[in-house]
Image: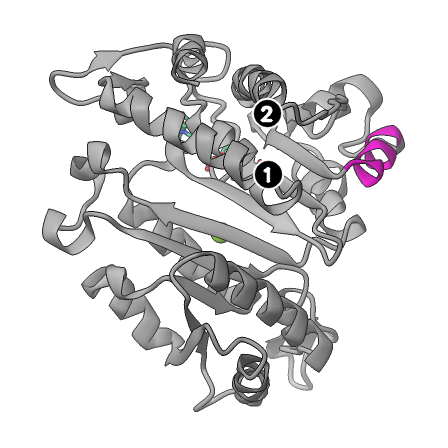
Amino acid sequence: MLPGDGIGPEIVAETEKVLNRINEQFDLGLQFDHGLVGGAAIDETGEPLPGKTLERAKKSDAILLGAVGGPKWDNLEMAKRPEKGLLGLRSNLELFANLRPAILYPQLASASSLKPEVVSGLDIMIVRELTGGIYFGQPRGVRTLEGGELQGFNTYVYSESEVRRIGRVAFEAARQRDGKLCSVDKANVLEVTAMWREIMDDLAKDYPDVELSHMYVDNAAMQLVRAPKQFDVIVTGNMFGDILSDEAAMLTGSIGMLPSASLNSEKQGMYEPCHGSAPDIAGQGIANPLATILSGAMMLRYSLGEEKAAGAIEAAVSRVLDQGLRTADIMSDGMQQVSTREMGDAVLAAL
Ligand code: NAI
Ligand code: MG
C-alpha cells in the first residue's frame, strides 16, 4: 500500500477497509505492508522513491498506489519531484503493460458528454505499452543546426520482443472478456507500426478464440467518439495509448470512477486510480474512493488470480450506485451525497 499524497491517503484508507473485508470473506491470506512514495516520501526522506519503498514494492505481489503530486513540490527540480516516484516504480518493476478499462455505469449515464444511445453499456479496455516507444527511444534531444536553427528529435523504436509481450497481455485480456481485440497503429506511415501489425497477426495464431482486427490511430480516435461500443479490447503503443486511453476515459465522464493496472511479465502489478492527487480537495473528506477501490478489484483479478473476489467488489460498487449514493464529483439531482468515508462504508455494507 503506497498511499502517496494529496487525496491518496484518504482513498487508499477506504480501499484497505474493503480489501481487509474481502481478505476475510474469501480467505485469501493477503498480507499488507505500507510505504512512502511521492510528496509524502519527499517530506519524510527527501526522496520521491526511498530505497526502502522500492525494496518492499519489489517483494510484493502487487502494489496499490493512491496518487502523487501537488503544488507544494512543484518548485523542485524534475528528478526530485513526486511524479518521479511513480516513474521509478514503473521502470524498476518493468511494468510494461498498462490496462485501463473505460466503463460507463448505467447509474451514471448522464455524466457522459455523448448521447446515451451511443455510450450506454460501454465497457472497453485499453492496453497500452508503457515502457517503450517514442517516449523512451534514443537518440533524443534538441540540437542547433549550422546557421543557428533549432532541431528537435525523438526516436520511435520497438523491438519484436516488446511487441510480443504487450500483444500477449492484450490477447489474454480479450480472452477473459468478449474475445475481440483491435490493434491500433499507423502502419500506412510508420515502419515501426507496420512491424507491430505483422507481429499481432502472427500472435493471433496462438489465440484462435480471439477475433483480431486492425485500425489506424486517426480512425480509432474518430471511432471512439462515433461508436465506442464496437470495441472490446484495444492494444496500442505508448504514445497512441496515452492519448486514446484519456479519450476513452472521458467517454464515461467521471474520473473518480476509473481504475488502472500496470503489469510486468511475472503478473506483478501496480494498481492505481486514473486520476491524480486532486490537491484542490485533499484533506476535505470528499474525494471519490471508488476508482481506487476498483483498482483493488483489478489487483485481485490480474495479479492474484482471485476473479471471484474481484467480481464481488465490482458488484458491491454497482450496488452502492444503485442505492443512489454519490460523492460530490458524480452527484446529480435526486441522489444522496456522501463523504469519502461514507462511500467506503457503503461498499463494505454491500459486501
Ligand atoms: P487530478 O486528477 O488530480 O484532478 C483533476 C480534477 O479532478 C480536480 O478538480 C480534482 O479535484 C478532480 N478529482 C480527481 N480525482 C478525484 C476523485 N477521486 N474524487 C473527486 N474528484 C477528483 O489532476 P490534476 O489536477 O491535473 O493534477 C493534480 C496533481 O496530481 C498534479 O501534481 C499531477 O502531476 C498529479 N497527477 C498524479 C497522477 C498519479 O499519481 N498517477 C496522475 C495525474 C496527475
Ligand atoms: Mg496521459
Q: Residue at x 65, y 85 (%)?
A: 147
| Residue 57 falls inside the magenta stretch | yes
Under mark 1, the amino acid is Glu
Quarter of the image that includes the N terminus = top right
Residue of label 1: 306
Q: Residue at x 83, y 40 (%)?
A: 58
Q: Earlier in the sequence, mark 1 or mark 2?
A: 2
| Res 26 label | 2
CA gap, disc 1 to disc 2?
9 Å
| Residue 97 falls inside the magenta stretch | no
Bounds of the magenta segment: 52-60
Under mark 2, the amino acid is Phe
Q: Are marks 1 and 2 in contact (CB under 8 Å)?
A: yes
**Front residue (pair 324, 50):** 324
Q: Is the C-beta of the residue carrying label 2 under 8 Å from the nearest atom of ligand 1? A: no
The percent position of residue 178, horizontal first and vertical second, equals 38, 61
